[in-house]
Image (cartoon, rainbow, N blue to C red):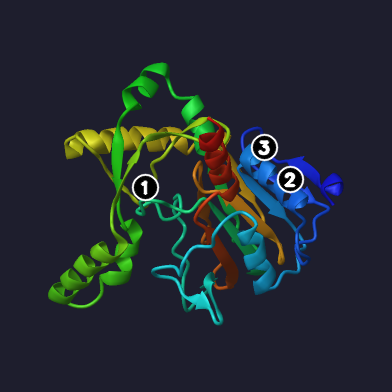
Amino acid sequence: MAGRIRISQLTPHIGAEASGVDLSKPLESSDADVLYEMLIKHQVVFLRDQKITPETHLALAQSFGEPEAPHPVYRNLQGFERITVLANGPEKPPSTDGWHTDLTFKTNPPFTTILHAVKIPPVGGDTLWLSMSAAYDTLPKGMKSELEGLRAVHDLGDFRNNFSHGDAESCGRELTAAHERFGNALHPIVQIHPVNGKKFLYVNPCFTRHVAGMKAQESNRLLSYLYDHIYKPDYQVRFKWTAGTVAFWDNRCTQHYATADYLPHSRKMHRVTVINDRRADSAKVKTLKTG
């Protein structure tokens, strides 16, 4: 199948569509390798008209690495605890309409996310992705030097809203417990991709709270500068979903934004996140053994 996979690049910096792939059948290792190479090169890959089951969804995820444990907030598909259900509509308005990289409050955020479009509204509901490596490449040289060695604190961010109901005392207890449950992480602002060696920015407004070692005003000023730079359309791809589409992206070096413009219609997606990059990990082990 690998020789029949066709690739259509969507923008100069990020995004590609693949055709000639049937994800309803087990992938041969060579086919999975081709999709992985597309992922590393294009950062987000789309495959339309896929008739997959929860079993094949998980199998696709396992071809890249280990699926993540159940999400700390969102509900999971019955019988498949590692598949998260993102179902939104008039009774449950969407809450992912903000730029973010998934779960950066964890010390080891997921490597990739695989999203399956189960139900799509008749209009609206697009998702945007942006390339954090392209955003880094176009920073002024002086700013690149200033960012080297800096780290930022990430915490539960917007998920605070899930624990902010009721009186002040009970909310305080719930928020404290949520912080303990979610944890915090300290990540370098500039990181190096473990596979292609490219540098990329690693901050996002949903979960990044503070630049370590700076006063609050200095930290806010620097993060605001970076966000103004990052969110230029030049680094983005906007994707219009169709039912059955599967998208997967490199969570390390991208951010995404799910538009919330489709109410009163509904949108339903199934999501699996993958903790580790099995191929990158294997390459590291091989290098250590032969180095």
What kind of residue is marked 2?
Answer: Val
Are discs 3 and 1 less than 8 Å apart at CB?
Answer: no
Residue 228 located left or right of residue 168: right
Q: Nearer the viewer, residue 107 or 145?
A: 107
Report whether 7 appears left or right of 83: right
Q: Which residue is mark 1?
A: 205
Q: Secondary structure at mark 2?
A: helix
Q: Which residue is denoted by mark 3 in the rendering?
A: 11
Q: Secondary structure at mark 3?
A: loop
Q: Residue at x 36, y 20 (%)?
A: 145
In the image, is residue 204 above or below residue 69?
A: above
Query: Residue 289 at what x, y percent from top left?
Result: 53, 37
Residue 28 position in % (x across, y down): 77, 56
Q: Dots 1 and 2: beta carbons under 8 Å?
A: no
Q: Earlier in the sequence, mark 3 or mark 1?
A: 3
The three-letter code of the residue at mark 3 reads Thr
The 10 Å Cα crowd at callout 3, few under 14, some 14 to 19, many 20 or more, is some
The residue carrying mark 2 is: 34
Provide residue 242's location: percent of width, then percent of height: 71, 62
Determine the secondary structure under disc 1: loop
Q: Residue at x 29, y 64 (%)?
A: 160
In primary-sequence order, the first of circles 1 and 2 is 2
Residue 120 appears in view: no
